[in-house]
Image: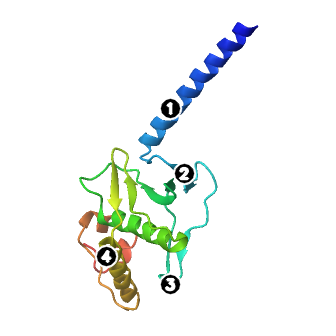
Amino acid sequence: MTILFLILAVFLILLALFLLRKGSRQRQAAGLPAGQVVYEDTSQWCKNETPLYDSMLRLTGKPDYLVNVGGIPIPVEVKSGRAPATPYPGHIYQLAAYCLLIARTTGKRPPYGIIHYSNRTFSIDFTDAMEEELLNLLAEMRACEKRTNVDRSHKDAARCAHCGYRSACEQRL
């Protein structure tokens, strides 16, 4: 009887080690850093949480994940496409907005955030300069809100071609 318990104990220990290793690999594949996941916004796992919100900036956002690293929430934004050579500016500003929202709502400033593409992960530092760029961009956006006639941006012809307002746009390419 004792030998049976010993075999069962060894089996359970090996199973636990296997599951820990598998979980670690899945975390790595998802681009998540080591740490406790404290929030996620993927409908596959559970109901979405309340978004982060700052009334002074009139800014709201829901990162895909928040990972607790040393007591500081780190935002992780997951993109389904393949990675460009460097992250797109819009993705960087989106991540910076999450970092700023975290800092303002929790009082804990994330030193970086993570953008995870299907084949590559980037760690983006959230510096004072990045925060200033983001705040300037938000101010520029707020100024544009007050304009009655805004020219369309046509820097990306493919984006213009797939725009939902293309049929009604007098400035389409």
Q: Residue at x 54, y 69 (%)?
A: 106
- Asked if labels 1 and 2 touch by Cβ distance under 8 angstroms, the answer is no
As displayed, is residue 102 above or below residue 11? below
Instruction: Look at the numbered discs 3 and 1 and tell me whether their residues touch, using CB distance below 8 Å.
Output: no
Q: How far apart are marks 4 and 2 (CA)?
A: 28 Å
Identify the residue position indicated by label 2 in the image. 37
Could you tell which of marks 4 and 3 lies nearer the N-terminus? 3
Quadrant in the picture for the N terminus? top right
Q: How crowded is mark 2: few (under 14 residues within 10 Å), some or many (20 or more)?
A: some
Q: Do the residues labelled 1 and 4 touch (CB within 8 Å)?
A: no
Residue at the image point whose x is 33% and y is 77% from the top: 132
Give residue 117's position: percent from left, percent from top.
Answer: 37, 50
According to the image, label 4 marks what residue?
133
Secondary structure, mark 1, is helix
Q: Residue furthest right?
A: 1
Residue under label 1 = 22
Q: How crowded is mark 1: few (under 14 residues within 10 Å), some or many (20 or more)?
A: few
Residue 140 spot, x, y in % from top left: 34, 84
Among the two numbered marks 4 and 2 on one chain, the one whose residue lies closer to the N terminus = 2
The type of residue carrying mark 1 is Lys
Label 3 belongs to which residue? 56
Amino acid at circle 4: Glu
Residue sitting at x 33%, y 73%: 128
Q: Distance between the residues labelled 3 and 1?
A: 43 Å
**Secondary structure beneath label 4:** helix
Q: Which of 165 and 64 is in front in this view?
A: 64
* Amino acid type indicated by mark 3: Met
Kindly report the distance in space between the C-alpha atoms of the residues bearing marks 1 and 4: 40 Å
Amino acid at the residue labelled 2: Val
Determine the CA span between mark 2 and mark 1.
17 Å
